[in-house]
Image (cartoon, rainbow, N blue to C red):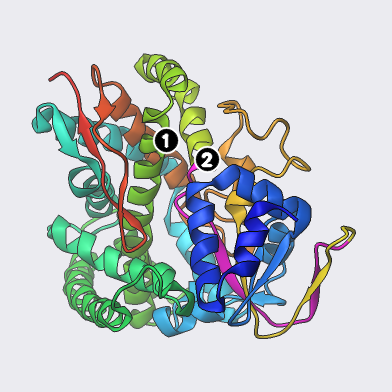
Amino acid sequence: MGAYLDRIDAAPDAEKWPLVRQLMLKERQPFFAELRAERPVLRLPDNMLFVTRHADCTLALQRWHDFGVDLYKPKQGDYFMAQDDTPDHWRDKSVMKAILDFEDIPAIRAFVGQEAARILRDAKGAIDAPQALTRMVPARVVQEFFGFTGSDAGKLIQWSYWNQQDAFHNQPFDKDVISDPEHVVSERKMAGIRLALYLGRVLLTRGVQLALHRNRTDSVTRLLRLKCSGGLKWSLSKVLFNAGGLLIGTIETTSNAVSNALAELLKRPDILAKAVAAAAGDDARDFDGYVFEALRYSPAFPYFFRVCHTPTLLAGGTPHPVTVQPGEIVILCTHSAMFDDAVYADPLSFDPSRSIWQTFTLGYGHHECLGRAIAAEMIPEMVRQVLRLPGVHAEGGLGYEQGVPEHLALRWNA
């Protein structure tokens, strides 16, 4: 048996999952390779399984009847992303996809580039990226395109942070990274109240504007116009809830992805030189693959979690099959899956010709990222603007707090 599995087997039960998490972050590729070869489904204490093969990750993410998002429900209530095969999920997701017009994407990318360039210009040679750039730019997108006009960007960032923190980083198995789980829950509840009060005022204003036939094209106005049309069964609370979801899902996830991609590229001198050359060109498409490939190496979310509903065979056809049982928490390590040589040619080579659609960066299956088309433009454009700075480099690595990137000191020749 391999050295990593020996360490895990020898560890006390309470230390097994924290050890797996650390190995996943610190010794990624050799650890993943050993698990995929010797124990592709690692059973852990507290009814947890850690899944590493591409085939098993995609199986679970595609079969939402058998693997559900039960753990989101206490955090997100009736929001459609906390549901699987329900009328609310199908209707609400369809509505939200409809109001996020693909036609807006070129304008959003141009706006992101302008805002990122402005912030970097004003920074005069030094910036802590998560604190002043990677959250602020998506907050400005929320203000400009989604209808949060006149809002305080700092408050938007806080509301997104606490909701994301509670949903994705404050689960029962996160005790090793969250020092005070109840504080996170309290902050998320308070953020939800403040967001609802703000959106209530926005909806009142938009309602008056609609009555006066003042034309607006932002996402909140589209939602309200659709509700008022009577064309589908949608309450005002649905408008408020889903408008809030636009904010919550945009800022923090974008910041995490941009921070991770920057840190990964800046520590690879040979790749960085090519990425900088591509960033300097006029065609952004020549550049984007560097960001998507960096996120394969350092994803914002290295795993997704589901709860088993139906006894299901994983690692079938291998010497190590495991039948997962109802009630078990399944940690789908998509980070490992993106290096599975059964699916990826030469997986350990940094290949910018791979597209983002060959990865799990924007999710997969029933719960794929709602704003995937926007994110696929916004994330690389922010990185591109940073790499256009003369002599840009990181002073120190990416600093994490409670599971998310909080500090990345960048310097350049102003």
Q: Secondary structure at mark 1?
A: helix
Write down the residue under mark 2. 297
Check disc 2: other Cα within 10 Å, few if <14, some if 14-19, many if 20+: many
Would you say residue 157 is visible in this rendering?
yes
Please state which amino acid type lies under the numbered disc 2: Tyr
Q: Quadrant of residue 260?
A: top left
Q: Does the segment drawn in magenta span residue 357?
A: no
| Residue range highlighted in magenta | 297-316
Please tell me which of labels 2 and 1 falls first in the chain. Answer: 1
Would you say residue 232 is visible in this rendering?
no
Write down the residue under mark 1. 264
Q: Residue at x 32, y 71 (%)?
A: 163
Q: What is the quadrant of the C terminus in the image?
A: top left
Q: CA distance from mark 2 to mark 1?
A: 8 Å
Please state which amino acid type lies under the numbered disc 1: Glu
Asked whether disc 2 touches disc 1, contact meaning CB atoms under 8 Å apart, the reply is yes
Q: Is residue 237 left or right of residue 364?
A: left
In the picture, the disc for residue 184 is none
Q: How many marks?
A: 2
As displayed, is residue 217 above or below residue 280? Answer: below
Check disc 1: other Cα within 10 Å, few if <14, some if 14-19, many if 20+: many
